[in-house]
Image (spheres, rainbow, N blue to C red):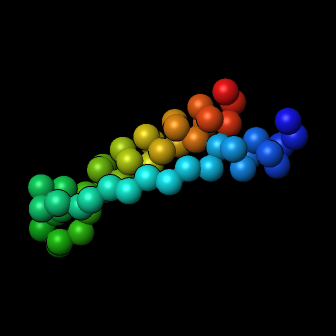
Amino acid sequence: MNIEERIKASENRMVKAVFPNTKNQYDSLFGGTALFWMDEKAFITATRFSR
């Protein structure tokens, strides 16, 4: 499998809801929560890419 096919095969989507307990006093998402979600997504993508 060439690199383009591996990239295409590792593509994925994730939907997360922002609830009041994940928002700060400025009514935006906590930075730590956003980083956690990005880390989770990166793990899934890397696992699918490397198999």
x%, y% of residue 22?
A: 18, 56
Residue 46 found in image quarter: top right
Task: Please name the residue shown 87% across and 40% down the image.
Answer: 2
Residue 15 versus residue 19: which sits nearer the camera?
15
> Which quadrant: the N terminus?
top right
Q: Is residue 10 left or right of residue 6?
A: left
Q: Is residue 47 left or right of residue 49?
A: left
Residue 27 found in image quarter: bottom left
Q: Residue furthest right?
A: 2
Q: Is residue 19 left or right of residue 5?
A: left
Q: Residue furthest bottom?
A: 26
Asked if residue 42 is positioned above or below residue 26 in the image, the reply reads above
Q: Is residue 4 left or right of residue 7?
A: right
Asked if residue 7 is positioned above or below residue 24 in the image, the reply reads above
x%, y% of residue 51?
A: 67, 27
x%, y% of residue 8?
A: 72, 50
Task: Please name the residue shown 73% across and 47% down the image.
Answer: 7
Task: Please name the residue shown 52% across and 38% down the image.
Answer: 44
